[in-house]
Amino acid sequence: MKIHLISLVIGALALGGAACSKEAPGAGKGATEQAAGAAQAPANAAHAPKDVKPGSHEDWCGEHAVPESQCSRCNPELIPAFKATGDWCAEHGLPESQCLKCNPDLKIVRPPKES
């Protein structure tokens, strides 16, 4: 199911592109606080370039500490794909697979740099 979800998310990203300037509607303060507690990229690397390979080290949203290709707060067009697969936390306005409030033991790890 996770492979199917990743495929849906990557497909939605390819159609919608990745651009971030605001949180998704309903993401609210909780989502911002959540990202602050996670490992973050340097400020100058807050968002991945548009042509980045999904799943790579460069595919990282430093603002929200999740893969850029799966960041529904930067790309709200991804939300329907997460909801369609049942991976949605309505209370916090983000994918359940990224919700550290509901899943405090969840570890979202940035992939290592390729040598």
Image (cartoon, grey):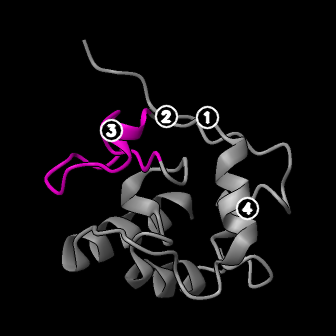
Q: Residue at x 46, y 35 (%)?
A: 41
Crowding near the residue tagged with mark 3, few <14, some 14–19, many ≥20 C-alpha atoms within 10 Å: few
Contact check, label 1 and label 2, Cβ < 8 Å:
yes
Dot 3 amino acid type: Asn
Residue 77 position within the rendered picture, expressed as x and y whole percent measured from the top left: 38, 84
Tell me the quadrant of the picture where the C terminus can be found. top left
Secondary element at image label 2: loop
Q: Quadrant of residue 6?
A: bottom left
Dot 2 amino acid type: Arg
Seen in the picture, residue 99 relative to 91 is either above or below; the reply is above
Q: Residue at x 84, y 55 (%)?
A: 103
Dot 4 amino acid type: Cys
Q: Which residue is mark 1?
A: 39
Q: Which residue is mark 2?
A: 110
**What is the distance, in whole Å, between disc 3 and disc 4 at their CAs?**
25 Å
**What is the distance, in whole Å, between disc 4 and disc 2 at their CAs?**
16 Å
Q: Is residue 30 left or right of residue 62?
A: right
Dot 1 amino acid type: Ala
Q: Between label 1 and label 2, give the one nearer the viewer.
A: 1
Secondary element at image label 1: loop
